[in-house]
């Protein structure tokens, strides 16, 4: 299972250190991480450079590349690719200094802005609701990133009003749209808009967009498995496994969406805490790096302790 080790600043005179590694609960030597996550090292190193880290390559004997180092004042990060750090090594990250590799705020891209502007023209949508939706997204760096990526991937093409009174939000995979209740985007009369619910729902539903293709495959397989059992000459017909498989897939889908919703919420809360406002960048918060869950590929991200 993945674990983190953190040595706090000043303890025994040493600088802070964060090490991400994979440890086996049964004593296996350096078990593979691929069953639980597939880190995208190229994406991760680009993110470090985007956050202001200076990159340099370290070499061993005969000019052999060993790892890439990234530095900015008070922080040092080393990134190793799979198989490049001794026999059996499967890649990893080592960081020194205040452990706060925060994501710098990037603006919504042009395609994402176009989706929001189109929402503002939907029947029944008021300028106030459009403003609150836009402000909610911009107040959470994680949401900005998720909206940009979801739109770029084609998973989100429209945002429309939700008419289902029993749902706080929906994602329609066939239409590639997200459905939000307009009441959740309205400022109460004489009051102040609270973006907390919308922040969580947006993060949650965006993750369903990434999960949709996988869920479609699971449902297709479910239909195939049901037909196979129904046509089997063995009696009684036992549907336990196909039903269990589709339930497990649904649980993973919802679990990933819940984590994405909390990531968006934590991102907004951290921004408010560090700036005293609803957006913008502030000082770094010391927090451990955690692997972000989700079926569209794990990526390292800062989360609340």
Image (spheres, rainbow, N blue to C red):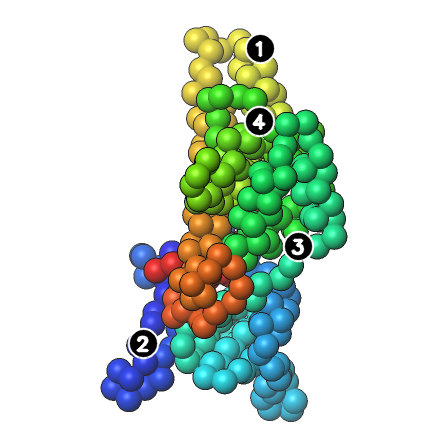
Q: Nearer the viewer, mark 2 or mark 3?
A: 3
Q: Nearer the viewer, mark 2 or mark 4?
A: 4
Q: Mark 1: give few (<14), some (14-19) or many (20+) Cα within 10 Å.
A: few
Residue 200 makes an appearance in the image: no
Q: Quadrant of the N terminus?
A: bottom left
Asked if residue 226 is positioned above or below residue 274 in the image, the reply reads above
Q: CA distance from mark 4 to mark 1?
A: 40 Å
- Check disc 4 and report the residue beneath it: 162
Q: Residue at x 62, y 62 (%)?
A: 106
Q: CA distance from mark 2 to mark 4?
A: 48 Å
Q: Residue at x 42, y 63 (%)?
A: 276
- Check disc 1 and report the residue beneath it: 231
Q: Nearer the viewer, mark 1 or mark 2?
A: 2
Q: Mark 4: give few (<14), some (14-19) or many (20+) Cα within 10 Å.
A: some
From the viewer's perspective, tell me whether residue 115 is left or right of residue 21. right
For residue 18, which quarter of the picture?
Answer: bottom left
Asked if residue 194 is positioned above or below residue 300 in the image, the reply reads above
Q: Residue at x 61, y 81 (%)?
A: 55
- Check disc 3 and report the residue beneath it: 108
Q: CA distance from mark 3 to mark 1?
A: 52 Å
Q: CA distance from mark 3 to mark 4?
A: 23 Å
Q: Residue at x 59, y 77 (%)?
A: 52
Residue 96 location (% of width, % of height): 43, 80
The foreground one among 128 and 174 is 128
For residue 180, which quarter of the picture?
Answer: top right
Whichever of labels 2 and 3 marks the residue nearer the N terminus, that label is 2
The dot on residue 295 is none
Residue 59 makes an appearance in the image: yes
Residue 115 location (% of width, % of height): 70, 42
**Do tag 2 and tag 3 residues touch (Cβ < 8 Å)?**
no
Q: CA distance from mark 2 to mark 3?
A: 36 Å
> Circle 1 — which element?
helix
């Amino acid at each position: 299972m993945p674990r983190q080790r953190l040595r706090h600043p000043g303890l025994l005179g040493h600088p802070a250190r964060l090490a991400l590694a994979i440890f086996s609960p049964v004593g296996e030597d350096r078990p593979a991480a691929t069953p639980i996550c597939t880190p995208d090292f190229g994406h991760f190193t680009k993110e470090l450079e985007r956050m202001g880290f200076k990159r340099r390559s370290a070499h061993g004997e005969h000019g052999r590349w060993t790892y890439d180092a990234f530095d900015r004042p008070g922080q040092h990060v080393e990134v190793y690719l799979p198989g490049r750090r001794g026999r059996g090594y499967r890649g990893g990250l080592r960081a020194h200094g205040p452990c706060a590799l925060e994501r710098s705020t990037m603006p919504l891209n042009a395609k994402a802005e176009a989706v929001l502007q189109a929402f503002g023209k939907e029947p029944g949508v008021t300028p106030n609701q459009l403003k609150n939706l836009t402000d909610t997204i911009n107040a959470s760096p994680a949401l900005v990133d998720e909206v940009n990526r979801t739109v770029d991937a084609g998973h989100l093409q429209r945002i429309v009003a939700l008419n289902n009174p029993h749902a706080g939000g929906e994602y329609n995979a066939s239409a590639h749209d997200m459905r939000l209740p307009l009441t959740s985007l309205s400022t109460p009369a004489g009051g102040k808009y609270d973006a907390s619910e919308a922040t969580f729902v947006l993060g949650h539903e965006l993750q369903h967009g990434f999960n949709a293709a996988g869920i479609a495959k699971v449902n297709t397989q479910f239909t195939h498995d049901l037909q196979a059992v129904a046509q089997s000459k063995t009696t009684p017909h036992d549907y336990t496994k196909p039903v269990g498989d589709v339930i497990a897939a649904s649980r993973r889908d919802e679990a990933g969406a819940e984590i994405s919703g909390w990531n968006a919420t934590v991102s907004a809360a951290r921004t408010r805490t560090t700036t005293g406002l609803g957006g913008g960048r502030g000082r770094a918060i010391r927090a451990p790096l955690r692997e972000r869950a989700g079926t569209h590929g794990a990526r390292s991200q800062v989360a609340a302790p």
